[in-house]
Image (cartoon, rainbow, N blue to C red):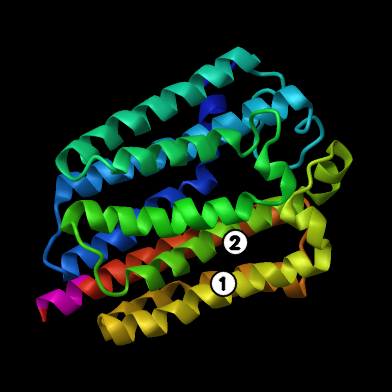
């Protein structure tokens, strides 16, 4: 029987920075635009965290019943390890998605109802990543989905529900956050190339192969920091505080590209990449707060 610790591990806490970061970043732009609304930022955070936990449990369920997780290295898989039944994990995913939907409905009711359609697309993308008869995560499209929903949609959405406007720099920030969120998934899929290939899961990493996936990981980090320059030019130079996260990215890229980390060594890379995204977003938030106060 799964313990609370098992459920926490199954939620994959190392991936949660991908949910927190776009909310921090988008709220920074809202602060700079003098439109910050704390309770809407909090609800956006609930939506993002619930979606991330939901997709993690949904992946555990779908990969578990397919047998993809039987020999995987990395964080605990609830079904693959045998500590939870498929029905339990599916229910946990459903509860997480329900929480996201309820918080999202409040945001839509207090902002604009077309946000319901965006939310429905996000939940659908979360489930069909590895669920359904033809999961798109098995066709190399997982990174594209992460970039869109945990990058552009999350940053733009967090800013919009507070300011009800498309503020300057939101696109650059969405791309930067999305690139680092993608890097987390790339590191995860790099670690799992062997087992995914055997299971017939054609992730982008499987398609590109080991070496090109490593260079993609480095390119995503480079793209994220490159986006800070036009963001600083179009909004405020203080946004360059996002570069404070650069040492974490350098360490992660060094492990992946120069030391060619494999297997369990990539778990530390996942941690560093998640912390880099969080530090990147927090730096931008702090910078835009300082720019607003000056």
Is residue 117 found left or right of 108 in the rendered image? right
The span picked out in magenta is 289-293
Tell me which residue sits at (47%, 22%) in the image. Answer: 94
Instruction: Considering the whole magenta stretch, tell me its main secondary structure.
Output: helix
Quadrant of residue 6 in the image?
Answer: top right
Q: Which residue does the numbered mark 2 point to in the structure image? A: 183
Q: Confirm or deny contact between disc 1 and disc 2 (CB under 8 A).
A: yes
* Quadrant (top left/top right/bottom left/bottom right) for the N terminus: top right
Rounded to the nearest angstrom, the CA distance separating label 1 from label 2 is: 7 Å
Question: Going from the N terminus, do you reach mark 1 or mark 2 first?
Answer: 2
- Percent from the top left, x then y, of residue 259? 77, 71
- Percent from the top left, x then y, of residue 158? 29, 53
Is residue 76 found left or right of 124 in the rendered image? right
- Classify 10 Å Cα crowding around label 1: few (below 14), some (14-19), many (20 and above): many
Regarding mark 2 in the picture, which secondary structure is present there?
A: helix
- Percent from the top left, x then y, of residue 27? 25, 59
235 or 6, nearer to the observer: 235
Label ID, residue 221: 1
State whether residue 193 appears in this view: yes
Compared to residue 289, the image places residue 65 above or below, namely above
Compared to residue 157, the image places residue 247 above or below, namely below
Q: Is residue 290 magenta?
A: yes
- Classify 10 Å Cα crowding around label 2: few (below 14), some (14-19), many (20 and above): many
- Percent from the top left, x then y, of residue 221? 57, 72
Compared to residue 90, the image places residue 104 above or below, namely below
Regarding mark 1 in the picture, which secondary structure is present there?
A: helix
* Quadrant (top left/top right/bottom left/bottom right) for the C terminus: bottom left
Is residue 170 found left or right of 66 in the rendered image? left
Tell me which residue sits at (64%, 17%) in the image. Answer: 86
Label ID, residue 259: none
Tell me which residue sits at (66%, 57%) in the image. Answer: 186
- Residue lying at the far right of the rendered structure: 198
């Amino acid at each position: 029987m799964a313990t609370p610790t098992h459920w926490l591990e199954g939620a994959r806490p190392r991936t949660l920075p991908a949910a927190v970061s776009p909310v921090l970043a988008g709220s920074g732009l809202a602060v700079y635009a003098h439109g910050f609304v704390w309770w809407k930022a909090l609800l956006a955070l609930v939506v993002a965290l619930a979606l991330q936990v939901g997709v993690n449990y949904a992946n555990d369920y779908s990969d578990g019943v397919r047998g993809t997780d039987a020999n995987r290295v990395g964080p605990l898989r609830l079904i693959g390890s045998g500590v939870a039944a498929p029905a339990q994990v599916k229910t946990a995913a459903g509860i997480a998605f329900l929480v996201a939907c309820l918080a999202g409905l409040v945001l839509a009711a207090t902002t604009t109802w077309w946000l319901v359609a965006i939310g429905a697309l996000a939940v659908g993308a979360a489930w069909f990543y590895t669920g359904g008869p033809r999961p798109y995560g098995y066709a190399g499209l997982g990174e594209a989905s992460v970039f869109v929903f945990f990058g552009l949609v999350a940053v733009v959405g967090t800013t919009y529900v507070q300011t009800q406007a498309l503020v300057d720099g939101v696109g650059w920030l969405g791309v930067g956050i999305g690139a680092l969120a993608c890097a987390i998934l790339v590191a995860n899929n790099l670690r799992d190339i062997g087992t995914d290939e055997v299971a017939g899961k054609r992730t982008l990493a499987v398609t590109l192969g080991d070496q090109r996936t490593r260079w993609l990981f480095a390119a995503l980090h480079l793209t994220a920091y490159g986006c800070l320059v036009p963001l600083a030019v179009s909004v405020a130079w203080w946004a360059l505080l996002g570069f404070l996260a650069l040492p974490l990215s350098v360490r992660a890229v060094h492990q992946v590209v120069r030391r060619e980390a494999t297997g369990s060594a990539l778990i530390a890379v996942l941690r560093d990449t998640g912390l880099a995204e969080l530090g990147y977003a927090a730096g931008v938030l702090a910078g835009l707060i300082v720019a607003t106060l000056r």
